[in-house]
Amino acid sequence: MKKILWRIMVTLPILWLSLGVITANADTVVVQCPGDTNGDGVSEDPNIVCMHISGGDGFSRMGDGKDLYGFSFGLVPAGTAPGAVLANMGLKARFPAPTIVLKEGQEFYLTMTNVGMVMRPDLFDPHSVHWHGFPQAAPIFDGLPEPSPTANMGASYTYYYYAAVPGTYFWHCHVEAAEHMQMGMIGNAYILPAQNELPNGTDLNGFNHQTGYKYVYNDGDGSTKYDVEYLLQFTGFDSLFHEAHIAVQPLPFAAMHDNYPMINGRGYPDTINPDPILNQEGFGAQHMSALISAETGQKILLRVSNVSTTHIYSFTTTLGVPLNVIGRGAALLRGPTGKDTSMQLSVLTVGGGQMFDVILDTTGVPAGTYFLYARDMGNLSNGDEERGGIMTEIVLTNP
Amino acid sequence: MKHRLRILQAVLIFGVMLFLGSVVISHAMIDGCQSTSFNLVAKQGHILTSDGDSMLMWGYALESGCPGESPVKHPAGVMLYPGPTMILNEGDTVTVTLKNELPQQAGNVSIVFPGHKVTASGGVPGLLTREAPPDGATTATYVFTATEPGTYLYRSGTRPDLQVEMGLVGAIIVRPSLGPLYAYNHLDTEFGHEYLYIITEMDPSIHRQVEMGQWAFIDTTSYFATNWFVNGRNFPDLMADPFVPWLLTQPYNCQPRMHVGDKTLIRLVGAGRDLHPMHLHGNDFETIAADGRMLSSGGGAGPDLAWKATTIRTIPGQTADVMWSWTGEGIGWDIYGHSGGEVHPAGAPGEGIVICNSYVPGNPTTYFDPYNNEYCPDHGVPFPVILPPRDAVTYGAFYSGSPFLGGQGELPPGHAGLNAAGGFFYMWHSHTEKELTSNDIWPGGLVTFMIVEPAGVDIP
């Protein structure tokens, strides 16, 4: 019975959309992907990357088992027929949103289809994509609702980015940002440097580049080389805000205060679960684990960001080695004349909207299980449940 | 028909601005009181918040206005939130006097000047400095020499948990001896425009208790801010002009504007009690100084320890100076919508010369057009996508109807049309996004917009 009710609620807004209130029908789902000659959503030009996402709603399961209603973006499988997007993508929001990974110099066509909010058919919110920290952005692709158009329900908007500057970014919806970001419309993004693609044996000021070496930035000396990388996106949910939302109540902006701190949309111990976390619909909305594993002696890159609408977080690890902060805000920590301004810290504070690149050098650290956790310890909880929140494990094994 | 008229109107306005702008090279400078003598009075007054409320504040008033100011901008004897921005020159010896006209229950009032060596006299002794008792007559005097250029703040040093919250705070700018268009005594700190961001927050319950005389109930330990300010105003009030009569007690605005390629200095002041991660859209910035000291390795070097980012935490009591610019470099399409071959328009610099005609691929010194700073490798590169039809999208009030700088487009009926010149608007805001509200009302609070204006639009 409950399932049937869900189905009706899923189909109602789609029916409403297809009745043409905003001239929305299957034809309005337009994916722009230059070089895609066979319509599979993938460009045949290797320098062009295409991605199709949906903007809508869904549920996430918190670390204490509570399902919270949210908004976010879903990943439309490449090659999905335009007519199937609105029908298939209801309640398929992922938390966090799909991750964007590009190589420096690539062109990126990101199409966002606003599939409407299944559980809030009374709303008519547009959605947008704001690539946070993107240098030399233009308003038309900046996703701000004030100086640009934003896609209404049923519409598709293609954003274009030329990946000029490598580094760690993130992205989110900027429509009514306090609400839409609190509801979960946030995701990871990063651009890999051209230095990764150099020919084998290239000399970088005395550092010998080998094919397969990975760097965070075009450092020119190999100083940002790492072995394994992990995304750590800090955020939080205020459960009262989410509960008021699905109950169609006035939203408590002034009282907003996150009580479910999370990494990659999960509170510990879900952070170490390698599998998707299934929500009440049986959908794995929370697709990202935050488990960090490496071999002893490896350099671990952490791409850290904070997208909380209420909190600034500080974190540390039990590894006993410093957090080597080599990048901040998608820029190598070097002064304008090249002076090294990187930082060796034991605790890193990450404000909302900040991104950092941190390298953990595990040389000399014995194999074992270690912790990465919020040093502001009030954030080690899942709602009322203690020993949760912003904590994950670093598992070091012998090679 | 109506929208056609509007387009025509916009084009005409733009043409006039193009003409005017071609003869004026201006530098936006921070509004404040340039003097070496400030006679301040702590007073009560009300401010307007963008949620439609009126809040009681305590602030520093200029007893008889800003000395020598012509034309007169700062009102005399009016509570100001924040206090008057003191514009000083390096080496100035400054005398600040303070009287206290606050209610008896407010107690004594004082001023501290973090980062300056102050000699205090008069008044009555206090814990941190000399204080002015609430008798409306006794004067405390503070004297200091502005030895180091930079951005500073001043605030009450008496019961600051209450008095700073109530509004007794302001900014100080010390201009270097090198000249007013430099942040510090180094050529690399030159700027074209400067803007001030004094960031504060408010717990309205405290202000209501003060107004109602419920002195026994005031508890600053359970503080919970629900409103946020830049230069004493919320969004969108901070976009209005400075010194408007309907915001008499909130004289300062925050409306940064610049042209393509200009260097803009932003002076950030964490004047309240919370941290706020301020995020700049559009491009990354360089933090060149903190707490009135250039981030430099010394020995005559410039800000060689500057760091780039797009978000900076303003820390309570701390100041920071960041430099920002925007050219659209590497954007991958022509921001003007040119198809190539266009000439600089009549009346503009480079009139009649083909745009980017000196561009040589592979030679970075030729990458920017000398007249309008256009990034030439993208000159004439077509716009990469087809935008959705107008009825499939919602147009923001600052959207010109065109994706191009200086562009115009058809706007739907009822659109506010607040971007007649086709500028690029970039939100500069707190990324603790909750703070984009004013007392439960979205939008408000810590939101500002930088406008990158097309060439020809004059920036006052």
Image: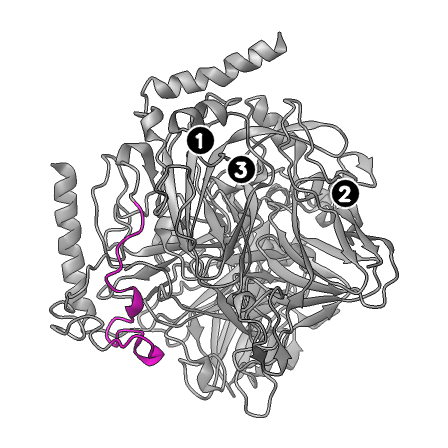
Q: CA distance from mark 2 to mark 3?
A: 28 Å
Q: Chain of mark 1?
A: A
In this picture, which residue range is highlighted in magenta? Answer: B359-385
Magenta stretch holds residue B376: yes
The amino acid beneath tag 3 is Glu
In the rendering, which numbered label is found on residue A384?
none
Residue reaching furthest bottom? B299
The image position of residue B136, as x and y in percent, is 58, 63
Camera-side mark, 2 or 3: 2
Q: Is residue A60 left or right of residue B427?
A: right
Q: Give the SS element for disc 2.
A: helix
Q: On the rendered image, what quadrant is the C terminus of chain B found in? A: bottom left
Residue reaching furthest top? A1
Residue A268, by quadrant, is top right
Q: How many marks?
A: 3
Name the residue that disc number 2 marks: A272
In the rendering, which numbered label is found on residue A179?
3
